[in-house]
Image: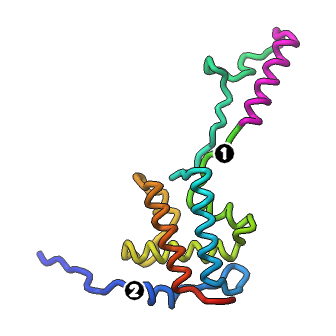
Amino acid sequence: MTVQTDTTTLPTAEEIAASLDWRGRSGEVVPGADAAHHLEAVRSLLDKRGWSRTVGSGSDEEETEDGTHPLAGADESWTVKRLLLGLIRAVVEEMSWTPAPPTLNGALDAVSRTADGDADTETVAGRCIEAVLRLRTGARYPSLIAWSGKRGRTYEEICEVLTEAAAFARTHGPAVA
């Protein structure tokens, strides 16, 4: 039995950068520095809020210390006082709800809605991440969502790719729009 091996050479960063579409969804060119800034803001956001491999529901545990919801079992037999206390506890718990840490893709999107980015920088920043993944894995069309959501993926790996993608954008991206 003969096993064929792929003898094609992997593209260089320069080749990938030359074929990368540096235009955002608006159709305008995104400077490499702007894409890099978006990626750095993503890293900062993840440093503050944490990172989740998968989409989570946050810390919305609507249970009391004994493991029951504050309004569990509420019926017409409850006194007004008991019902009001249950409602107050439920409202307090709802107000203290904290969202789950974002995924990489969620963080890219979140930054696009701040002063640090927009839809165009989000699009190009995502392409820069995929360019780095292409260089790392040799895959032609790696998905940042699939890569970042892979079981066993670590926060350190996410940070490394964000740092590499920002450097890629600064080095290979257009100077001005």
- Callout 1 crowding tier (Cα within 10 Å): few <14, some 14–19, many ≥20: few
Residue 37 percent coordinates (x, y): 63, 73
| Residue that sits furthest to the right in the current view | 80
Residue 55 magenta-highlighted: no
Position of 42 with respect to 80 (left or right) is left
- In the image, 1 versus 60, the foreground residue is 60
Instruction: Kindly indicate the quadrant of the structure image that contains residue 119.
Output: bottom right
Q: For label 2, count other residues whose C-alpha is less than 10 Å away and answer few (under 14), some (14-19) or many (20+).
A: few
Assign the magenta stretch its main secondary structure: helix
Q: Residue furthest left?
A: 1
What number is the disc on residue 12?
2
Above or below 158: residue 152: above
The answer for how far apart the CA atoms under marks 2 and 1 are is: 39 Å
- Point out the stretch of residues depicted in magenta: 76-96
Q: Which residue is mark 1?
A: 99
Secondary element at tag 2: loop
Q: What amino acid is labelled 1 in the image?
A: Pro
Counting from the top left corner in percent of width and height, residue 98 is at: 68, 41
Q: Is residue 77 magenta?
A: yes
Describe the element under mark 1 as helix, strand or loop: loop
- Is 58 left, or right, of 20 in this rendering? right
**Label 2 or label 1, whichever comes before in sequence order:** 2
Instruction: Please tell me whether residue 142 is drawn above or below residue 26 in the rendered image.
Output: above
Quadrant into which the C terminus falls: bottom right
Identity of the amino acid at label 2? Thr
Quadrant of the rendering where the N terminus is positioned: bottom left
Residue at 48% across, 57% down:
149
Rendered residue at 59%/68% (across/down): 40
